[in-house]
Amino acid sequence: MGKISLVSSKYIIHSTISIEGIVDKPDIIGAVFGQTEGLLGADLELRELQRSGRIGRIEVNTETRQGKTFGTIVVPSSLDKAETAIVAAALEIIQRIGPCNAKVQVKEIQDVRVSKRQYVVDRAKELLKQLQDSVLPDSQEIADEVTHSVRTMEITTYGPERLECGPNINDSDEIIVVEGRADVLTLLKHGFKNAIALNGTSVPKTIVDLSKHKSVMLFVDGDRGGDLIIKEMLTVADVDFVTKAPDGKEVEELAKKEIHKALRSRITAEQAKLELPKNGSSAPRRPAARPQAREQRRERPQRDTRERAPARERPGIGPQEKKLFKEISESLIGTRGACLLDNKLNVLGKVPITELNGTLENLQNVYAVVFDGVIESDVVRTAEKAHVQRLVGMENKTRPQDSRILMATIAEL
């Protein structure tokens, strides 16, 4: 018996044999050794190779059909490529087995290491995956996880309008009123946990009630919209201090040093009332509406009529849609993602906000978009080109009458 098996061999010689008569397996094996004896020299003598373990046990499988014998011969080898090929070729010189003519033909020489190599690759992939799943994340992943935790776990809501705010809004004697959810997140990131969002230009009743028993500091963007919010807040709420971001900047864009500087530069509400006319805004009450109306008429003398007329005819966002949009909006808080829906309100997919415009440009069957971000003019334009009907965000910085799309914020839902 040979000293190596199929498992430990490097090559396997596969050959077929056809015999014009009926013979037994020992006859075939005897012919293999007998007819190749002395053919290849002492170094490649099959008996010696098998005795030293360089050729394994020769396997013969046969069957008899119509008085003839057919079968296969399998020879495992641990020789090198050239020596194995020589042994394989030597098998084909067998022409007779016992009294019968025979023919041997080598079909292939199989390299066993190929299958072993594939097993090694597949197993290495499994082990690498297990390693990546079990090891600790790198420092960047830890930082991202902590940041995400701050943004999603500490932010909460307050009042019937569910205004986004920091966790210390109840415990703090002073609150910081900002424009939107993104501003609350920015202040949270830098350690200010007593901020609350207006979520629009109209002042919610919750803010009015809070201003009656807490010290209120209004912190708005450094643009005309910030001036309008100051004017509105000073009209309806008891504001103690007012401050603004640097000109042309929004609160959510500020670094920690800029936030501290803005808060230290706060002014009293009385001083803010005096400075509003100097900043190009009108007086706090009714006269403010007239310059604004005149400015809108100068900017859109005819477009206003054309766009408002169809807006009265189209229905608003229905109760079922509001309920669904609200659930999706709440699930997206802190994810910076967008959810796309078709006209049957089935979810088509979710994408990061950074990929929203590109995705809408490639799709034409999107009915509604709900996303964790601000509704701005570029998003509205892209949504109009994609024939989107509903647009729901955390904040809205566009005028509803400027687009055919029905827009809403999470606070309005």
Image: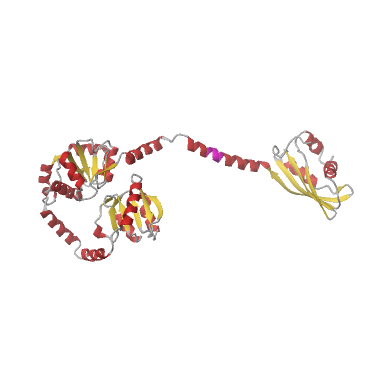
Toward the viewer: 356 or 205?
Answer: 205
Kindly tell me whether residue 242 is visible in this rendering: no
Residue 280, percent from left and from top: 13, 51
Q: Nearer the viewer, residue 395 or 204?
A: 204
Nearest the eye: 26 or 118 = 26
Q: Residue at x 82, y 44 (%)?
A: 25
Answer with left or right where residue 284 lies relative to residue 315. left
Q: What residue lies at 16% left-to-right and 49% top-to-bottom?
A: 232
- Residue 131 lies left or right of residue 91; in this view the side is left
**Which image quadrant: the N terminus?**
top right
Looking at the image, the residue that sits furthest to the right is 99
Residues shaded magenta: 124-128
Q: Position of residue 393 (x, y in %)?
A: 30, 51
- Asked if residue 331 can be seen in this view, the reply is yes
Q: Is residue 98 above or below residue 147?
A: below
Against 350, residue 389 (above or below) is below
Characterize the magenta stretch by its predominant secondary structure.
helix
Up-down relation of residue 403 to residue 134 (above or below):
below
121 or 399, nearer to the observer: 399
**Total marks in image:** 0
Tell me how the rendering is colored. Answer: secondary structure
Splitting the image into 4 quarters, where does residue 399 fall? bottom left
Is residue 349 shown in magenta? Answer: no
Q: Residue at x 72, y 43 (%)?
A: 12
Residue 266 at what x, y percent from top left? 16, 39
| x and y percentages locating residue 105 in the rendered image | 78, 50
